[in-house]
Amino acid sequence: MGDAEGEGPGGTFPSLMAEGALLSRRGEHGKALGSFTNALQLQAGNKHCLVARSMCYLKLGDTENSLRDAEASLQNDKTFSKGLYQKAETLYTMGDFEFALVYYHRGHRLRPELQKFRLGIQKAQEAIDNSVGSPSSVKLENKGDLCFLSRQAESKKVKQKLQVKAPKKDQKQQSKVGPIRNEKTERQLLGELYADKAYLEKLLKDADLIKSSTKHGMTVEDLILGGINYLDTRTEFWQQQKPIYARVRDRKLMQQRWLPERKRKPSEVARYILKSMEEIDMLLTSSCPEGSCKKAEHVLKTIQGWSEDEIPNKNELIGNLYSCIGNAQIEMGQMGAALQSHKMDLEIARENDLPDAVSRALDNIGRVYARIGKFQQAIDTWEEKIPLAKTSLEKTWLFHEIGRCYLELDEAAEAQDYGEKSLQSAEEEGDVEWQLNASVLVAQAQVKLQDFQSAVMNFEQALEKAKLIHNDAAQQAIIIALDDANKDFIEELRAEQRTERLESFRGTNLPGNRCVKQCRKFCISPSLLPHPRTLGGVATPQWNGLDTTDTGGP
């Protein structure tokens, strides 16, 4: 082994990396830091190890060392995405939101598929907006705001003069004590942690306690001061990330936004609705039905609190939201809840005479019934929708699904009928993929009807369509079904040939003994022949229970 893999302090490089990762996952960042440091002694400058150690430093609140390691990981590779993200996270924690945003953007350009960079951009931008403030939310009027600012500036100048004249001793003493904080502000920023800080400060006044030491040699005073210092650091960060004035501003804006008596502008309402519906749809298409459902329920609750003057099409929008909730519930497998949501959509649509919404609701209700195996209810629902279908493509899908339900119910004739309707609509639309689906449905129904020749023809047509759209999976499935249908068709032909052969020697105009001789010639056992019966003086046998009487006359 080379030096990189050789034994070092505590083991090999891979073992130290694995140990550090395990300790870090357990939350033992101090121990993990030691493992990564030892690993770097074996492979100095390893970018992955530097990022791992930077993360430990950041967890421990040592932002300077965290930034140093993050920058070192980028020294030889400026496009190292993990290093870019770690540097951005460290800068964000340090309160340098602008530079953090720069590195989040760099990482996003290199690895746009990673969600962490998008989230980083979002939180950094929000922190900048909160720190700097949005110009639209601040309006200075000539009533008192400007006078207040001028008075504030004057008082600031006076304070600066007093500070210049103050003795140096007081300045030194003030820096030792630490910055004078507003207790109310600190309480708001720390939240539940404020009680912990107050407790630590109370312990610091116990002279006997702070002089004692731990078994590791650290004094209790150092531990308490470390805890207080950490809380002070976090307070400063939270103040930078979202100052108190920004919190107050946001709270007031939220209160104003949802006050029932406040008159919202039509443009605000339209923008909110449009953005919300886009988010609901995006979450559902991004395989996040839970988020889509929660968002739709939240918007529904909000819309229900608004008046119809603000939203002229309020009922239509509420029905649409119930439809979105139902679709998300289908994806989550909550079929009972989905059925209720879509029935609410249908009820609202019928009450408000909204034919498009009625069509949508019937479509979705049928889908739910089909999913849970209630095929007859699905058929009834979808057949009610047929007059509301507007395009050939919509009819194609609708006829196909109804036919599929009939096939599941073993009603092959109805399935074939709807399959042919679906195929006709697909040909009118020129949609090859739906022509493929409809042809397969017709062929499957014909197999159940034992019309194997027609089934083979439709399977062959479906195979051509599958080749045309390069659907390999469909081709394989159709080839297997076509092979089975061909076998059944060949067997049917053989059976017909045997029947025809027997028909040709059934002896309609022959005496019974002559018929027996002909059967022996073709190796047919005479014992299979029943006694001849005479119709109008002509011997007419029956073969094995099959009535082969020639009704065409003598």
Image: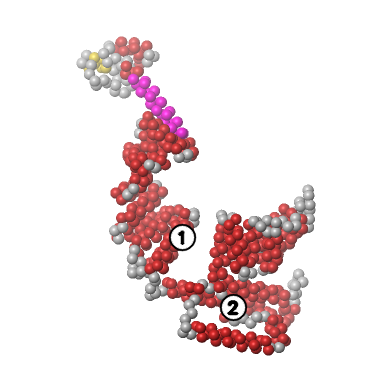
Task: Give x and y (percent) for residue 486.
Answer: 42, 29
The residue shown at (29%, 20%) is: 542
Where, quadrant-wise, is the C terminus in this rendering? Answer: top left
Secondary structure beneath dot 1 equals helix
Q: Main secondary structure of the magenta part?
A: helix
Instruction: Determine which of the numbered discs, if any, sits on residue 279 in the image.
Output: 1
The residue shown at (53%, 77%) is: 245
Task: Give x and y (percent) for residue 502.
Answer: 34, 18
Q: Residue furthest left?
A: 536
Task: Give x and y (percent) for residue 127.
Answer: 56, 69
Mark earlier in primary sequence (1, 2): 2
- Give the Cα separation between the discs numbered 1 and 2: 36 Å
Circle 1 packing at 10 Å, graded few (<14), some (14-19), many (20+), is: some
Which amino acid type corresponds to the residue marked 2 in the rendered image? Answer: Glu
Which amino acid type corresponds to the residue marked 1 in the rendered image? Answer: Glu
Circle 2 packing at 10 Å, graded few (<14), some (14-19), many (20+), is: some
* Figure check: 433 above or below 526: below
Q: Which residues are magenta?
A: 479-500
Q: Is residue 342 magenta?
A: no
411 or 174: nearer the viewer = 174
Asked if one can make out residue 162 in the rendered structure from this viewpoint, the answer is yes
12 or 278: nearer the viewer = 278
Residue identifier under label 2 = 186
535 or 486: nearer the viewer = 486
Determine contact: label 1, label 2, CB under 8 Å. Answer: no
Left or right, residue 337 beside residue 22: left
Secondary structure beneath dot 2 equals helix
The residue shown at (74%, 75%) is: 219
Give the total number of marks visible in the rendering. 2
